[in-house]
């Protein structure tokens, strides 16, 4: 690209600063506070947008509270006619869903949408509310919590400037936002449009690394705004801001002859540490160029055609700085009254951004790009087919839209990784694996094994180059680890399901051992903390002293139960690898294999060691803990000092909330238990007190919730809780009392754990109590941050007839919401040396059929869905009494027939032999465990001085 070579900006871009290397992270809460302050300040300013067309100020609200239209069709019951009409990308764009509703491809890097000035809601750019639009930007994440992500280089469009004076157009983020026209928002896969109140209609569609925008204008000679009259002469600006306003450095240049604008910026990731560098390249088509220039904050000039070194704090308070082009009126025959803007993006360079745009959208054909995007979605979704006769349109839309959302992220950044050169795929926006390991990744294993394989390869390559698997990761940066090292579960899950081809299992195994054995310096960003105690004691003491690394020294219970599950999953992998001749074809190679972890001796000893550590969740189990709330207000001073011997609830100030006994509680260095309120961090008690940087012993959930998390050892848990009946009462109590919070992924499994107590019908009942009440097709139809995972809950529960126990080859059977569902997994286990079949059409269908499917029982989709219970089941024609199946069904294809009825069956799936596996049923194992626990506790008691007695039971 010779044209840029001698530009001053290019020179600046070539020697981009190193000074930004290590800005210490402020605490997230503080950042949010600063962000809110700035945004609230901005909002005050935004109440009176100055360039709103007068007409729109008086236009009536013509569609719904926010004027959004849905992408769903009015009526279509045909078997897979065009599935895209059942996808409404706007679901979950209010009420904390944070869903990205714009134009994109499956796993696409380009994600275009209108950005909205809605603090705390605009994590994905757009929000279905009535706040003004700040611009149109090209990259986003979907469904995330924390701060808003990406949203770099927004475009903004004016149809003309007052008095034809470009300096009178609004440039900065502070001045330019405008309301949307009510009823003008429309979204469908690969397409998004909105009209803003200055008369401009914005449409957008994408390829993988580029966006094509079409801006249309009213076409009238003069536009009448509150501030004056603007002759028709569109001005388009590009701002170097991002959604979070985090830029620390940047540059931009406009080329007056061609109208090309290129630029770059350095930004911070939304829930992680460090910074990333992004680039864009924009071209325009449709009108002659009149003038070009740059702007800083609200001041524009046509004298300067480039800006460089626009860093942090440069334009307080908006961060706005960029370039602009003013056009003659667009009156070409071809596209009357509209201008196309093509924006390529890259994380490598400006040249790469230009190349991406030129390669992917050479033809500037909006309809072609949109058609290709839609085709890509149809093809991706064609692995699932549904006979929806009898199922309401709302439920169909809930199902398909949920499935669609699970394919938005992780994003495929292969070829765009600036951090290292590798022939491996690179995926990013693993956001966070803590959310996605439970339902989303297992879903991808079934419906898109090729992508799941590439994602695992990317995880392994991240380990190779950065030394640890990520938990959270976004924009090439390490994200904050919320609990365990759950990439271990993702890897084990793929392995136990036979997704083994093309994966370097030696390095994969080394990576999970590294999580289990080697504590990183900052375990807040990857790996695990408190590992010395974890190894020696089997739990993280509440008052542990960690000399090996740093991280938020909290969440001792929730990290502990997740570490235990991670270790259990590693034991499955150790055993599987040791038995797998597929992976180590020659015995010699097998003998030689030594992962780069000093504690490793052999796969068999590893299997036993990690199996033992997989039982560590029990170290937090306090058998005498009651469901007590300590009300400090009414606590007598003397009670505060009294050790809570034997859980004496009659001490004034302690309130007994339910009869259930035995909870996970924090443990001290002495081995004793410490009081932790059982319901804190649930919707009914201080829900927002358990985040990454708070001090409690649980993360985003209560001890009530975490006390159910032992998927590896449910039979043990059930007997500790007092047997199946008490367990069932307790789990039902959890769901009815409001302690359960469905807006977070940890709650998914608790809906289905009735299976382990021989009551699979209750799993179906509770699933139907949440779908469609909390998971539905409205704009607020997702109960919490989508995380690209909430849709996996409905895809499994409503469609596939099973729910996965992630990490194990176990799927719990629940009756689907459809008459028949077919899935095509597309992997070929029998040719392990060959590639994963990328041709999913060759795979066989796994068919889930509901017999006695009764339209009545499916409810009306608006609530009141009646219970549906499995009476009997057949797998490939044979009676199937187990309430679970394995991956073989999806892998080989087959037919699962579920006979349903209105009452819970007393026989199907209820016998001990029909329950899903528990891996710790050996009584000797627990006898030995209890003996050692007693011994260790005695020793620790003797070692410590007992200073925390008043906090113990
Ligand atoms: C949006 O703008 C386009 C083009 O100007 C116009 O045809 C359309 O009617 C507008 N839509 C709404 C809902 O105002
Ligand atoms: C990757 O390879 C290219 C071409 O050889 C080189 O310019 C670039 O610096 C390399 N990137 C990294 C991160 O090593
Ligand atoms: C990811 O992107 C690379 C490079 O464009 C491509 O080869 C690969 O097929 C993509 N993977 C998926 C799962 O789409
Ligand atoms: C903790 O640090 C000690 C001393 O450096 C080291 O020997 C040990 O291996 C570390 N343990 C872990 C679990 O990382
Ligand atoms: C083993 O790990 C160390 C430390 O990360 C690294 O320096 C070394 O190169 C690795 N060795 C192998 C064989 O991968």
Image (spheres, rainbow, N blue to C red):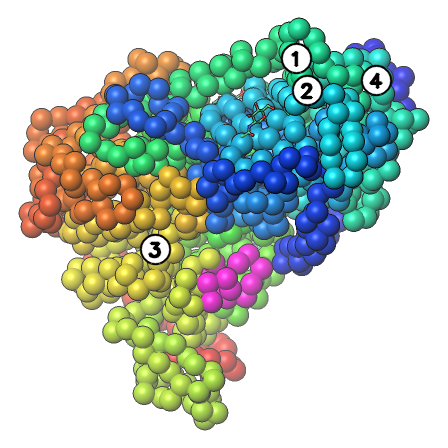
Relative vertical location of residue 429 with respect to residue 540 in this rendering, above or below: above
Relative vertical location of residue 811 with respect to residue 335 in this rendering, above or below: below
Judge the density around disc 4: few (<14), some (14-19), many (≥20) Cα neighbours within 10 Å.
some
Mark 1: is the Cβ under 8 angstroms from ligand 1?
Answer: no
Residue at 35% from the left image edge and 42% from the top image edge: 776
- Find numbered disc 3 in the image and state the secondary structure of the residue it sits on: loop
- Find numbered disc 4 in the image and state the secondary structure of the residue it sits on: strand
Q: CA distance from mark 1 to mark 4?
A: 17 Å
Residue 893 location (% of width, % of height): 23, 22
Foreground label between 3 and 4: 4
Contact (CB < 8 A) between labels 3 and 4? Answer: no
Residue 406 location (% of width, % of height): 43, 34
**Residue bearing mark 3:** 709
Q: Give the numbered dot on residue 336.
A: 1
- Find numbered disc 2 in the image and state the secondary structure of the residue it sits on: loop
Quarter-of-image position of residue 490:
top left
- Find numbered disc 1 in the image and state the secondary structure of the residue it sits on: loop
Q: Which badge, 3 or 4, comes first in the chain's sequence?
A: 4
**Residue bearing mark 2:** 219
Q: Which badge, 1 or 4, comes first in the chain's sequence?
A: 4
Give, as a single range, the part of the protein colored magenta. 686-699
Q: Quadrant of the N terminus?
A: top right
Residue at 30% from the left image edge and 36% from the top image edge: 395
Foreground label between 2 and 3: 2
**Residue bearing mark 4:** 290
Horizontally, residue 909 falls left or right of residue 206, namely: left
Give 569 or 264, whichever is nearer the viewer.
264
Give 144 or 387, whichever is nearer the viewer.
387
Contact (CB < 8 A) between labels 1 and 2? Answer: yes
């Amino acid at each position: 690209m010779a044209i840029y070579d001698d530009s001053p900006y290019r020179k600046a871009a070539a020697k981009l600063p190193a000074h930004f290397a290590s800005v210490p992270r402020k605490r997230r809460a503080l950042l949010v506070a600063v962000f809110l302050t700035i945004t609230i300040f901005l909002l005050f300013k935004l109440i009176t947008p100055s360039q709103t067309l007068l007409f729109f100020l008086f236009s009536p609200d013509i569609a719904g509270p926010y004027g959004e239209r849905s992408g769903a069709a009015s009526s279509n019951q045909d078997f897979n006619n065009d599935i895209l009409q059942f996808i409404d990308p706007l679901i979950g764009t209010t009420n904390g869903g944070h869903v990205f509703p714009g134009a994109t491809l499956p796993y696409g890097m380009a994600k275009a949408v209108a950005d909205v000035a809605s603090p705390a809601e605009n994590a994905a750019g757009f929000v279905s509310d009535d706040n003004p639009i700040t611009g149109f930007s090209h990259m986003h994440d979907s469904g995330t919590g924390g701060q808003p992500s990406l949203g770099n280089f927004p475009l903004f469009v004016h149809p003309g400037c007052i008095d034809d004076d470009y300096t009178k157009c609004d440039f900065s983020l502070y001045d330019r936002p405008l309301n949307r026209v009510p009823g003008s928002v429309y979204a469908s896969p690969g397409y998004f449009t909105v009209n803003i109140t200055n008369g401009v209609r914005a449409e957008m569609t994408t390829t993988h690394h580029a966006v094509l925008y079409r801006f249309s204008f009213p076409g009238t000679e003069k536009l009448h705004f509150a501030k004056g009259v603007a002759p028709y002469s569109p001005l388009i600006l590009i701002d170097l801001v991002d959604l979070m306003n985090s830029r620390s450095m940047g540059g931009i240049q406009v080329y007056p002859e061609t109208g090309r604008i290129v630029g770059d910026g350095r930004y911070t990731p939304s829930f992680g540490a460090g910074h990333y560098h992004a680039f864009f390249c924009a071209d325009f088509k449709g009108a002659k160029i009149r003038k070009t220039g740059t702007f800083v904050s609200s001041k524009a000039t046509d004298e300067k055609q480039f800006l460089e070194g626009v860093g942090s704090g440069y334009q307080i308070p908006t961060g706005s700085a960029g370039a602009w082009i003013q056009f003659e009126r667009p009156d070409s025959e071809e596209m009357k009254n509209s201008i196309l803007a093509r924006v390529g993006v890259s994380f490598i360079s400006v040249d790469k951004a230009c190349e991406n745009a030129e390669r992917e959208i050479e033809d500037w054909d909006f309809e072609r790009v949109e058609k290709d995007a839609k085709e890509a979605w149809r093809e991706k979704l064609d692995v699932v087919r549904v006979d929806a006769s009898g199922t309401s349109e709302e439920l169909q839309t809930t199902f398909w839209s949920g499935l669609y959302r699970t394919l938005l992220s992780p994003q495929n950044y292969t070829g765009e990784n600036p951090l290292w050169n590798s022939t491996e795929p690179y995926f990013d926006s693993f956001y966070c694996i803590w959310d996605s390991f439970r339902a989303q990744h297992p879903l991808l294993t079934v419906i898109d094994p090729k992508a799941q394989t590439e994602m695992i390869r990317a995880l392994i390559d991240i380990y190779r180059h950065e030394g640890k698997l990520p938990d959270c990761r976004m924009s090439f940066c390490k994200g904050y680890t919320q609990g365990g090292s759950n990439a271990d579960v993702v890897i084990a899950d793929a392995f136990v399901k036979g997704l083994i081809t093309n994966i370097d299992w030696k390095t994969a195994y080394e990576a999970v051992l590294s999580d289990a054995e080697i504590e990183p310096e900052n375990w807040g960003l990857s790996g695990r903390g408190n590992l010395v105690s974890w190894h020696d004691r089997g739990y993280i003491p509440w008052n542990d002293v960690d000399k090996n690394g740093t991280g938020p020294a909290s969440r001792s219970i929730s990290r502990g139960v997740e570490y235990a599950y991670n270790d259990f999953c590693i034991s499955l992998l150790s055993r599987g690898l040791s038995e797998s001749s597929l992976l180590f074809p020659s015995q010699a190679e097998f003998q030689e294999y030594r992962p780069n972890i000093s504690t490793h001796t052999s796969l068999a000893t590893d299997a036993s060691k990690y199996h033992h550590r997989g039982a560590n969740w029990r170290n937090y189990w306090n058998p005498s803990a009651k469901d007590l709330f300590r009300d400090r207000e009414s606590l007598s001073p003397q009670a505060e000092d009294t050790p809570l011997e034997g859980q004496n609830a009659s001490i004034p100030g302690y309130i007994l909330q339910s009869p259930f006994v035995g909870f996970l509680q924090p443990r001290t260095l002495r081995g004793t238990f410490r009081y932790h309120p059982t319901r804190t961090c649930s919707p009914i008690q201080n829900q927002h007190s358990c985040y990454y940087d708070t001090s409690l012993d649980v993360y985003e959930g209560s001890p009530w919730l975490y006390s159910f998390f032992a998927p590896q050892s449910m039979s043990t848990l059930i007997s500790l809780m007092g047997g199946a009946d008490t367990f069932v009462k307790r789990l039902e109590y959890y769901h009815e009392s409001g302690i359960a919070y469905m807006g977070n992924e940890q709650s998914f499994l608790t809906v289905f754990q009735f299976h382990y107590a021989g009551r699979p019908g209750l799993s179906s009942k509770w699933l139907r109590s949440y779908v469609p009440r909390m998971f539905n097709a409205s704009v607020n139809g997702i109960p919490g941050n989508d995380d690209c995972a909430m849709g996996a809950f409905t895809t499994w529960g409503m469609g596939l007839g099973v729910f996965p126990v992630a990490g194990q080859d176990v799927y719990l059977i629940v009756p689907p919401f459809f008459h028949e569902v077919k899935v095509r997994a597309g992997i070929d286990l029998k040719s392990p040396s060959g590639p994963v079949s990328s041709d999913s059409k060759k795979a066989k269908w796994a068919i889930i059929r509901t017999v006695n499917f009764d339209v009545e029982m499916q409810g009306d989709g608006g609530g009141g869905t009646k219970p549906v219970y499995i009476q009997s089941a057949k797998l490939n024609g044979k009676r199937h009494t187990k309430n679970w199946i394995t991956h073989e069904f999806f892998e080989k294809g087959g037919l699962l027939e579920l006979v349903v009825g209105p009452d819970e069956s007393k026989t199907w799936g209820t016998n001990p032999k029909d329950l899903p596996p528990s891996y710790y049923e050996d009584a000797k194992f627990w006898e030995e465990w209890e003996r050692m626990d007693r011994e260790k506790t005695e020793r620790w008691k003797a070692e410590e001085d007992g200073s925390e007695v008043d906090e113990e039971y």
